[in-house]
Amino acid sequence: MEFQTFNFHPQIAAGIKALGYHIPTPIQRQAIPPVLQGQDVMGLAQTGTGKTAAFVLPILERLMTGPRGRVRALVIAPTRELADQINAAIADLGRQTRLRSITIYGGVNMNPQIQKLRIGVEIVVACPGRLLDHVAQGTIGLSNLEVLVLDEADRMFDMGFLPDIRRIIKHVPPKRQTLLFSATMPDDIRRLAHEILRAPVTVQVGHTAPADTVSHALYPVDQHLKTALLLELLRHTDTESVLIFTRTKHRAKRVGQQLERAGYRAASLQGNLSQNRRQEALDGFRNGSYQILVATDIAARGIDVSSISHVINYDMPDTADAYTHRIGRTGRAAKTGDAFTFSTREDEETIRSIERVLGEKIERRTLYGFDYKKPAPSRDTEFARLPREPQRRRQQNPTTWKGARAQPNSPEGRARRRQEDRKTGSAGAQRQFPRRAARRGSPGSLRPRG
Ligand code: AMP
């Protein structure tokens, strides 16, 4: 099946062609026809499956007819990065359509957003908090809205955005098309879907398991040997771009520094740095000047680098869902990727739940020649200990993991969410390596600088 089958407007077809898409991905094959027909859709698809184009293309098609200069489609996303990515997909796919799309999120000046809204746009891609600010100030009109998309609904729920979503829905016309995409379907999302979707068509790819273009391996290792194993593994593996996940911001920073010291072109995405520096790290990772990015789950949300060949879980994710999200960064759109996970004795339970989701046992690997017996340093270094609980969890209800929803309407809940929103947008980069250093490594290899 080719894209021509959908009979998109020639200006949209031109955008598809320009991006080099030939064959629709499974989620596109399933979702595009009902969305084109105006039906509500619940899409169970993780990032990397082509889900963005699955809703963007039919929305562009709908907007080709009808009035311009009014907000007719609204996409809500959990993070600025994802909002930027969706907006970029709209700009690319709709480059010949003259349809206008903007992003609306916090952490940046509101005035340019207000100006663009005044001039007139047809599509808005927004994060919930800032969108509600615009609604409250009357700087955005949603009365002409025809299509509402909630992307990565499970992440929005994890981040405590569900009450905001419900508030936003009160401001959009009840007669609309609603599309909800989520990698997983926790009960609260199912309930929300039931409330806001009308007779939805459910489309699903690969259940909630990671894309099957990814191969998985576990590397059992003691806590204090993780960095040594990481360095050894990188030396022995042919990699393109590597995304490494740690459990805390601090560990992301430290591992990034250790990789730099070992001669790799590495950056870390961590909190407390400006949006500019964060963007610099992301751009550097995208354009290949950084080959390794070390990040926490929150900081890495929405990263889409098509050449990520390896995801390495330096620390085990908290849940099988988090594993799915992390792994969704590699093996994107029919490319293959490897997912390596370092596991310690404490991780057994999480491994079992990941294996249940994958429907198979993950291969346990031992790196030949690596000294697994090396004792922990006598000084109790932080890397010899279990990682601290990530800050996100400590701020939430201690009795529930998905505690982000514990007190969603409380002032503390809102304050925390805002703080988190700021945090997700404020991670930053290590210093940029000189170009000379970037050229020294052979392309496609991750050998350290000489
Ligand atoms: P997404 O799941 O929407 O984040 O998309 C993952 C990646 O797949 C993005 O880099 C898209 O540009 C790419 N992609 C989406 N649809 C297709 C397609 N039909 N053919 C090739 N690449 C695609």
Image (tube, helix red, strand yellow):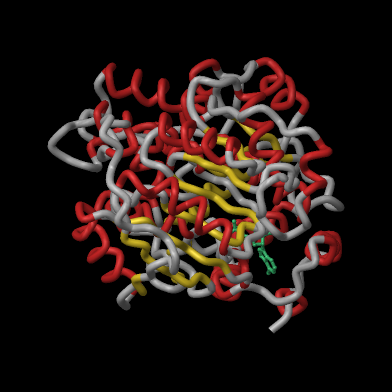
Answer yes or no: is residue 241 visible.
yes
Question: Residue 427's quadrant in the figure?
Answer: top right
Residue found at x 86% / y 52%: 96
Quarter of the image that includes the C terminus: top right
Place of residue 95 in the rendered image (x, y in percent of width and height, measured from the top left): 83, 50
Residue at screen point 61% across, 51% down: 304
> Which image quadrant is residue 218 in?
bottom left
Residue 263 vs residue 114, the one in the foreground: 263
Quadrant hosting residue 118 = top right
Q: Where is residue 114 in the image (x, y as percent from the top left)?
A: 67, 20
Q: Position of residue 252 (x, y in %)?
A: 46, 36
Please state the total of marks drawn on the protein image: 0
Residue 21 position within the rendered picture, expressed as x and y whole percent measured from the top left: 75, 69
**Image quadrant, ligand 1:** bottom right
Is 319 displayed left or right of 279 in the figure? left
Identify the image quadrant of the N terminus. Answer: bottom right
Locate residue 387 relative to residue 431 in the image: left or right.
Answer: left
In this picture, residue 31 sits left or right of residue 228: right
The image shows residue 148, relative to residue 422, as above or below, that is: below
- Toward the bottom, the furthest residue is 1
Q: Which of 189 and 240 is in front in this view?
A: 240
Toward the viewer: 239 or 400?
Answer: 239
Residue 143 visible from this viewpoint? no
* Side (left or right) of 220 relative to 436: left
The residue at the point 54 percent across, 33 percent down is: 257
